[in-house]
Amino acid sequence: MRGIRNRVRAHYSATIARHGPTPLGVDWQNMAAQQLRFVQLLRICDFAAPFSINDFGCGYGALLDYLKLRHPGAKLTYRGVDLAPAMITQAEERWGKRPRTTFAVASHCDGIADYSLASGVFNVRLGEPLAAWEAYVRSILVDLRAHSQIGFAVNFMLPHDARRTERELYRTQPELWVKFCHKRLGCSVEILTDYGLREFTLLART
Amino acid sequence: MGEYVKQNFVPMILAQMNFRFGPGDPLREIVALQKEFEIFSLEHSLRDSFNLLNVGPQDERQRRGFFRYLDDLKNVEAEGVGLKKLDGHTAIITALKGNLEGKSPMPVFFAYHLSTRGKQAVKVTTTAAMEFSPIKYLTVSLPTLPEK
């Protein structure tokens, strides 16, 4: 697992170095689609009351941009975690002065929160063998479950209709991960699809 | 467009626009983005909308030129059903918004045509833009002037 993490860290360190704190810097094509993913992931959260959140794979803190725009009154305690030190440097520069906001370079969540979110962290497989990548995905889901009091939300890319998945990417149908989160992690699972992107969002309530 | 953006960037910009609004997954995505964020709205400029979609050259100077071109469409006329009284910039927003929020959104094809100075107009039509395909597109043709 350490080898995969090192390669993921190297990949995202390179993207942020090349593109800076922009959607391209975290491998998303544009801000609008990046924020459409946040819309789905945040459906796990109840904005009626204050809450805390772990943002695993937080990148340069784009989730906070979205929250400021769409949920300016939300009372939330935020912890952003990323494998890549360059991402955390950018996130701290942009959001370090926000109250109740902290960041850490880490390969797992390091504190319990009401909710944990991870956007796009499973998509770029970097040519890793499928079995190894799915073991990596499982390890992250176990970690998100362990650090979430109410629930967690993640997204995955769906397969193409008529062509094979690119070797660099990971695409999957929901069933495998619904079963894992339900049977192995003991969660109640909801799947969101049909929101305009070839992917699904998995909401797991503990 | 060549007055604002170097000639060799123009095909790339049109390719980006046509890919972003193309049939299938791209159209589904842009329709969803319009539904969620109202990307194309008279409250936003085309510059902001295309910037949000990351459409435009990565080269900063050329990107500024492209956005300036979009801004300057406010100074040209428009041709198309229900668009004739609008300026080019407003006509494009109106046409895209109407299409993407409609019952059967069409993919959008962006092209350009040659105009003469003072008579430039954005042209919006519905056509089978790809001669080899029966798919109907909302076609937005952007005015250009001959190089001096």
Image: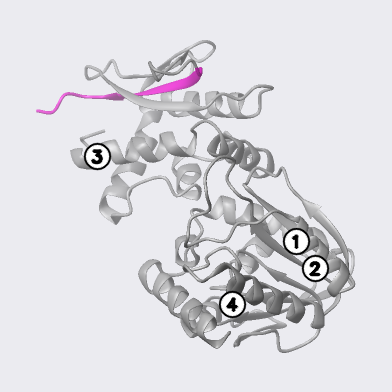
Residue A42: in sight, yes or no? Answer: no
Magenta span covers which residues? B135-148
Label 4, label 3: how many angstroms apart (C-alpha)?
Answer: 36 Å
Residue beneath disc 3: B4
The residue at the point 70 percent across, 84 percent down is A109
**Same-chain status of marks 1 and 3:** no
**Same-chain status of marks 4 and 1:** yes
Mark number displayed over residue A206: none
Of circles 1 and 3, the one toward us is: 1
Task: Indicate left or right for B4 with B124 as reference.
Answer: left
User: What chain is tagged by disc 2?
Assistant: A
Of circles 2 and 4, the one toward us is: 2
Of circles 3 and 2, the one toward us is: 2
When asked about the image quadrant of residue B18, the answer is top left
When asked about the image quadrant of residue A154, the answer is bottom right
Residue beneath disc 2: A180
First along the sequence among labels 4 and 1: 4
Residue B20: in sight, yes or no? Answer: yes
The residue at the point 59 percent across, 77 percent down is A95
Residue beneath disc 1: A176
Mark number displayed over residue A95: 4
Do callouts 2 and 1 mark residues in contact (Cβ within 8 Å)? yes
Q: Amino acid at mark 3?
A: Tyr
Tell me: residue A58, above or below residue B100. below
**Same-chain status of marks 4 and 3:** no
Label 2, label 1: how many angstroms apart (C-alpha)?
Answer: 6 Å
First along the sequence among labels 2 and 4: 4
Do callouts 4 and 1 mark residues in contact (Cβ within 8 Å)? no
Task: Indicate left or right for A42 with A46 as reference.
Answer: left
